[in-house]
Image (cartoon, rainbow, N blue to C red):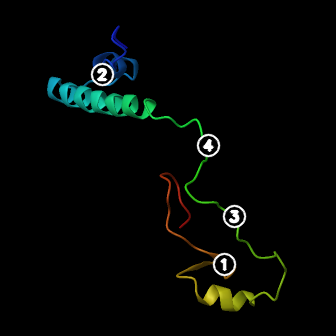
Amino acid sequence: MSDKGQIDVGYVAGLARLELDTETKIKLQKDMEGILSYIKQLEELDVSGIEPTAHATLLTNVVREDIAGESFPRATMLANAPAEVDEELIKVAQVLPGDGMS
């Protein structure tokens, strides 16, 4: 941060160990100054009579009761699977690198 209370993009980039070219630093500096200017405008608002909220509307949790019911037979569930392993498990595509199941 500079003495003027503005963000020094070069300094912050150094802390984050980012290498930014001059053009990017200038653009980010301008963007950050715009954000800080907007925050200063918001600080001027009188919000003393407004109750703090996390959301614009009231939120309620809409969930159903968790009641155990009839299960589908294993054969029916596996019939929807693209591939099976040992006629027991659903085979999915490998997501992480490394040795996968064949």
Residues under numbered marks 2 and 1 in contact, where contact means CB atoms less than 8 Å apart: no
Given contact means CB atoms under 8 Å apart, are the residues at marks 4 and 1 in contact? no
| Dot 3 and dot 2 residues touching (CB under 8 Å) | no
Residue labelled with disc 1: 86
Q: Amino acid at mark 2?
A: Val
Between 32 and 47, the one nearer to me in the picture: 47
Q: Amino acid at mark 4?
A: Pro
Residue 98 percent across, percent down from the top left: 50, 51
Amino acid marked by disc 3: Thr
**How many other residues sit within 10 Å of disc 3, few (<14), some (14-19) or many (≥20)?**
few
Q: CA distance from mark 2 to mark 4?
A: 32 Å
* Residue at image point 49% right, 68% down: 93
- Residue 9's label in the rendered image is 2
Depth check, front residue: 69 or 6: 6
User: Is mark 2 in CB contact (under 8 Å) with mark 4?
Assistant: no
- Asked if residue 36 is positioned above or below residue 66 in the image, the reply reads above
Give the side of residue 52 with respect to residue 65, left or right.
left
Could you tell me which quadrant the N terminus lies in? top left
CA distance separating discs 3 and 2: 41 Å
Q: Disc 4 designates what residue?
A: 52
The disc, 2 or 4, on the residue closer to the chain's N-terminal end is 2
Label 4 vs label 3, nearer the camera: 4
The image position of residue 58, as x and y in percent, is 64, 60
For label 3, the residue is 60
Cβ atoms under marks 4 and 3 closer than 8 Å: no
Q: Residue at x 57, y 53 (%)?
A: 55
Dot 3 or dot 2, earlier in sequence: 2
Query: Considering the numbered disc 1 on the image, is that residue within a helix, a strand or a loop?
Result: loop
At mark 3, the secondary structure is loop
- Mark 1 Cα-neighbour bin, 10 Å: few <14, some 14–19, many ≥20: few
